[in-house]
């Protein structure tokens, strides 16, 4: 029997529906917290019953186009349920891969400067790492076995969110406002969060799964 998969895509505007995969389950998000999609992941992953789980943004199809070179060239960005199941079994499948030389943590420090450095230093006692990561996974664009995802959520993501708490260092301005070009998205985030800039914490959290799998000797593939 083929392994089952809960492939979920989050959207917050009806216009996003045309970009969702036809095999995906849809999750409409009306609001927004400083934790962005991680708050949704923390709520829905523990309730999933499939063998594999993925919780991605509505932008996944476009982002795969951006990763076409690392997916194998023209046409390789196409994603179907048959393609996913044909690649099984795997522990983790990265859906928007980067170059093997991509440095996840160094790039974040270059992008966000002092906000990243201060927040990441404050998080090191919790995550126990400061070395560069083997696998670059952004925006939670991955598929993984249910037991791996649930362990990550219950024993790493949720405790990390709790660790961050109300510590101001994790809510410092990230500087992303100066890099974001989508004015509609800027207005939405500013309205829902009641602040001018993105906080630094969601940029840490989107790298958290890469940190979690580091050194675990998992079967990681790109798909």
Image (cartoon, helix red, strand yellow):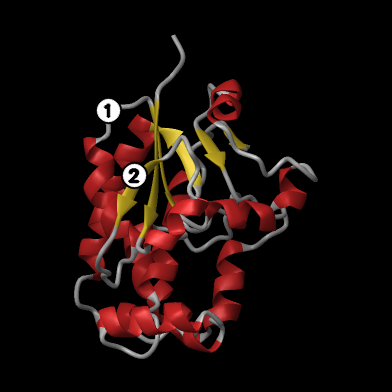
Mark 2 or mark 1, which is nearer to you? 1
Callout 2: SS: helix
Q: Which residue is mark 2?
A: 152
**Residue for point 68% across, 60% down:** 102
Across and down, in percent, residue 32 comes to: 27, 69
Across and down, in percent, residue 199 comes to: 36, 80
Callouts 2 and 1 close, C-beta under 8 Å: no
N-terminal-most mark, 2 or 1:
1
The residue furthest top is: 1
Image quadrant containing the C terminus:
top right
Task: Establish if 40 lies above or below 181.
Answer: above
Image quadrant containing the N terminus:
top left
Graded by Cα atoms within 10 Å as few (under 14), some (14 to 19) or many (20 or more), the crowding at tag 1 reads: few
Front-lying residue, 216 or 69 = 69
Q: For residue 125, which numbered disc appears in the image?
A: none
User: In which image quadrant can residue 169 be found?
Assistant: bottom left
Q: For residue 49, which numbered disc appears in the image?
A: 1
Residue 113 horizontal side relative to residue 27, left or right: right
User: In which image quadrant can residue 149 be found?
Assistant: top left
Residue 24 horizontal side relative to residue 157, left or right: right
User: In which image quadrant can residue 166 be found?
Assistant: bottom left
Across and down, in percent, residue 214 comes to: 51, 47
Callout 1: SS: loop
**Residue for point 36% across, 72% down:** 201
Total marks drawn?
Answer: 2
Task: Establish if 194 lies above or below 37.
Answer: below
**Residue for point 57% across, 79% down:** 111
Q: CA distance from mark 2 to mark 1?
A: 16 Å
Front-lying residue, 47 or 105 = 47
């Amino acid at each position: 029997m083929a392994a089952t998969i809960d492939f979920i895509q989050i959207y917050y505007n009806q216009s996003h529906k045309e970009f969702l995969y036809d095999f995906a389950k849809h999750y409409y998000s009306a609001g927004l917290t400083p934790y962005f999609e991680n708050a949704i992941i923390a709520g829905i992953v523990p309730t999933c019953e499939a063998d594999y789980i993925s919780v991605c943004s509505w932008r996944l199809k476009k982002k795969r186009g951006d990763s076409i070179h690392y997916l194998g060239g023209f046409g390789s960005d196409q994603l179907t349920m048959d393609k996913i199941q044909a690649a099984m079994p795997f522990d983790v499948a990265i859906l928007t891969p980067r170059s093997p030389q991509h440095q996840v943590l160094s790039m974040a420090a270059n992008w966000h400067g002092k906000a990243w450095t201060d927040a990441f230093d404050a998080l090191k006692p919790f995550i126990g790492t400061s070395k560069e990561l083997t696998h670059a996974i952004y925006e939670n664009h991955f598929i993984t076995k249910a037991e791996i995802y649930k362990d990550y959520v219950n024993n790493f993501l949720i405790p990390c969110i709790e660790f961050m708490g109300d510590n101001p260092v994790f809510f410092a301005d990230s500087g992303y406002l100066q890099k974001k070009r989508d004015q509609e998205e800027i207005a939405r985030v500013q309205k829902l969060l009641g602040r001018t800039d993105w906080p630094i914490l969601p940029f840490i959290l989107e790298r958290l799964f890469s940190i979690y799998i580091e050194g675990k000797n998992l079967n990681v593939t790109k798909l």
